[in-house]
């Protein structure tokens, strides 16, 4: 593979997969209010 | 009568997997790699990422806010926003009907090819085998015979999808995605690892990633990047509105959109690596340049890949992984497309979920089998797919963006809706992207596409054929949307829809998180009870009455 192709492969993987990992970490660090809602709907009255 | 609540995803992960399952479809595997290669290789990453951040994710967020706020199907959500806008939602439902009817057929082919892979039934002529398998007619425009080999598999595909939908949001859609998405990832990762170990894999990767920076000055590259992001993310179908309508009132919308958008792109990149490593093997083996073996779409999956499978060691194993991945990716997307229709019909008619799924399923199965499991099916599918995407999905998205951002000027309100409960706050950039950038790009895509249609018949098909199978289908979807929006809903009572918006006094600032209604556990399926309820106030502008 040419140097430019290797660099672009690394940059692509870092940006796209790095973006996914960052986004997933962000989502799971935020309180799961969806679950709270869900639990609220199932709580006995 | 107490109103029964709308179904909800049981967990955030369930929603994320379903949204990712919808976004990751056949296009990720067979379209992205070729588009990226042809439009600048490694340099394509730049317009692609810009398109993701300025159009894909902003649109995803908008659809999430609409779905979560109005808690209704696509037509119901648009109707509650502004009554005439219901036509946009019904248009999307009609578009989904068309797409689902042929998408299932491709799934049926993939299912058969999983079986064919074991014996490499295509022999040394995959192209001829594919044509004889589909019993493809000599020319487009005629349907003279039925293809039982496709039809029976198609019925099985429909049965599987409909059973999942009949089980409901939690037990059906969510559970299916929790099974199929991990399976898809495992299958595809194994496939990519295998592809990377083939002779010539680096030749393919070199072709795929070598940047052509000069391409960035070509407008068509940017249009292709926006088009790829747009068609790949399941936006503009009403799917994300429908899926977000099953979210809790306090769900994180922007964080979810970022996760779904980047996950979808990550899978595309993985597919690009896998496909081009495989094409590199084929090029090396046949002594050709990579650009001579590149293909996309149906040709890549059902002609090029079988040929490669025949030439590689352990080809059957590779074939099962590849076609199995297509089946998993396609099935999770098909479910989401049909759910748009089911949700709208269920809400409109008041029928229970199972009755709705059966009714919609029968209609789809009849159309799908009657038109596409025939000798003329491949041509019809090709034309319908091209025109419904350009003048159905993209045009409906453009119209909805203009209505929401310019006619109703709802973006600030939708932004407040997202910001109230989300991990990433939106700024003026979001409104700029949706109000200016995306409509301009979509508008340009439309003009560009029309110019091409007028300069040359798509795939050189006869005009008479394109008039009904292409323009006719796209026009019929639009007409159906308008007509359906004019129908009086049998159960159209103010405030009686499942998941009506929580009443807010007119003028209530939308950036106040609303208290979720105290409701009982949602039934997984069955009739959605609708009692008389309060008028769904939409900040004083709702148009729910008829």
Image (cartoon, coloured by chain):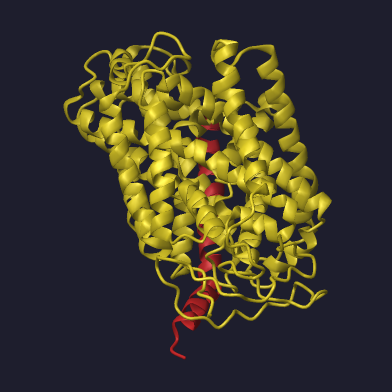
Chain colours: A red, B yellow
Q: For this view, does B14 lie left or right of residue B318?
A: right
Q: Is residue A17 visible?
A: no
Position of B491 relative to B34 (above/below): below
Residue B541 lies in what quarter of the image? Answer: bottom right
Residue B24 or B42: which is nearer the viewer?
A: B24
Q: Is residue B500 visible?
A: yes
Residue at 30% x, 28% y is B150
**In x, y percent, where is residue B412?**
79, 62
Residue at 27% x, 13% y is B125
**In x, y percent, where is residue B162?**
36, 50
Position of B310 relative to B22 (above/below): above
**In x, y percent, where is residue B209?**
52, 31
Residue B482 lies in what quarter of the image? Answer: top right
Position of B74 relative to B500 (above/below): above
**In x, y percent, where is residue B20?**
48, 52
Q: For this view, does B473 lie left or right of residue B522?
A: right
């Amino acid at each position: 593979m040419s140097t430019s192709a290797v660099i672009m492969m690394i940059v692509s993987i870092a940006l796209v997969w790095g973006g996914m990992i960052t986004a997933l970490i962000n989502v799971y660090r935020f309180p799961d209010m969806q679950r709270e809602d869900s639990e609220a709907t199932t709580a006995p009255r | 009568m107490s109103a029964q609540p709308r179904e909800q995803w049981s967990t955030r992960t369930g929603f994320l997997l379903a949204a990712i399952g919808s976004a990751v479809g056949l296009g990720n595997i067979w379209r992205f790699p070729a588009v990226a290669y042809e439009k600048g290789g490694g340099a394509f990453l730049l317009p692609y990422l810009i398109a993701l951040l300025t159009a894909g994710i902003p649109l995803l967020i908008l659809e999430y806010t609409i779905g979560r706020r109005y808690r209704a199907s696509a037509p119901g959500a648009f109707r509650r926003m502004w009554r005439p806008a219901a036509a946009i939602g019904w248009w999307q439902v009609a578009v989904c009907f068309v797409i689902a009817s042929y998408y299932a057929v491709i799934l049926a082919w993939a299912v058969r090819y999983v079986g064919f892979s074991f014996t490499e039934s295509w022999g040394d002529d995959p192209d001829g085998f594919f044509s004889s398998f589909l019993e493809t007619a000599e020319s487009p425009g005629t349907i003279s015979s039925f293809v039982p080999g496709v039809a029976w598999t198609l019925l099985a595909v429909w049965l599987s999808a409909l059973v999942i939908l009949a089980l409901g949001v939690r037990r059906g859609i969510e559970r299916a995605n929790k099974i199929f998405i991990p399976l898809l990832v495992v299958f595809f990762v194994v496939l990519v690892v295998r592809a990377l170990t083939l002779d010539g894999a680096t030749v393919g990767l070199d072709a795929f990633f070598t940047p052509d920076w000069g391409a960035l000055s070509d407008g068509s590259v940017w249009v292709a990047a926006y088009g790829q992001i747009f068609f790949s993310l399941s936006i503009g179908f009403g799917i994300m509105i429908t899926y977000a309508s099953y979210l809790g009132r306090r769900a994180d919308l922007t964080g979810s959109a970022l996760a779904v958008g980047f996950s979808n792109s990550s899978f595309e990149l993985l597919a690009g690596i896998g496909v081009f490593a495989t094409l590199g093997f084929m090029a090396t083996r046949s002594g050709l340049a990579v650009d001579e073996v590149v293909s996309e779409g149906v040709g890549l999956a059902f002609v090029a890949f079988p040929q490669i499978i025949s030439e590689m060691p352990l080809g059957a194993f590779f074939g099962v992984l590849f076609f199995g991945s297509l089946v998993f990716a396609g099935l999770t997307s098909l479910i989401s497309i049909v759910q748009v229709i089911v949700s709208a019909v269920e809400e409109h008619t008041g029928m229970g979920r199972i009755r709705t799924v059966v009714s919609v399923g029968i209609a789809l199965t009849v159309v799908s089998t009657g038109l596409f499991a025939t000798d003329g099916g491949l041509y019809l599918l090709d034309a319908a797919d091209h025109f419904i995407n350009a003048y159905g999905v993209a045009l409906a998205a453009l119209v909805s963006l203009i209505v929401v951002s310019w006619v109703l000027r709802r973006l600030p309100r939708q932004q407040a809706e997202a910001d109230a409960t989300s991990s990433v706050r939106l700024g003026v950039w979001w409104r700029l992207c949706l109000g200016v950038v995306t409509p301009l790009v979509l508008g340009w895509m439309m003009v560009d596409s029309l110019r091409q249609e007028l300069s040359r018949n798509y795939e050189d098909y006869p005009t008479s054929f394109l008039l009904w199978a292409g323009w006719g289908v796209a026009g019929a979807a639009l007409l159906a949307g308008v007509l359906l929006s004019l129908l009086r809903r049998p159960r159209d009572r103010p405030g009686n829809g499942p998941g009506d918006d929580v009443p807010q006094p007119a003028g209530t600032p939308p950036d106040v998180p609303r208290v979720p209604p105290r409701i009982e556990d949602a039934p997984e399926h069955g009739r959605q009870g609708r009692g008389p309820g309060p008028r769904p106030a939409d900040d004083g502008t709702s148009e729910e009455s008829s």
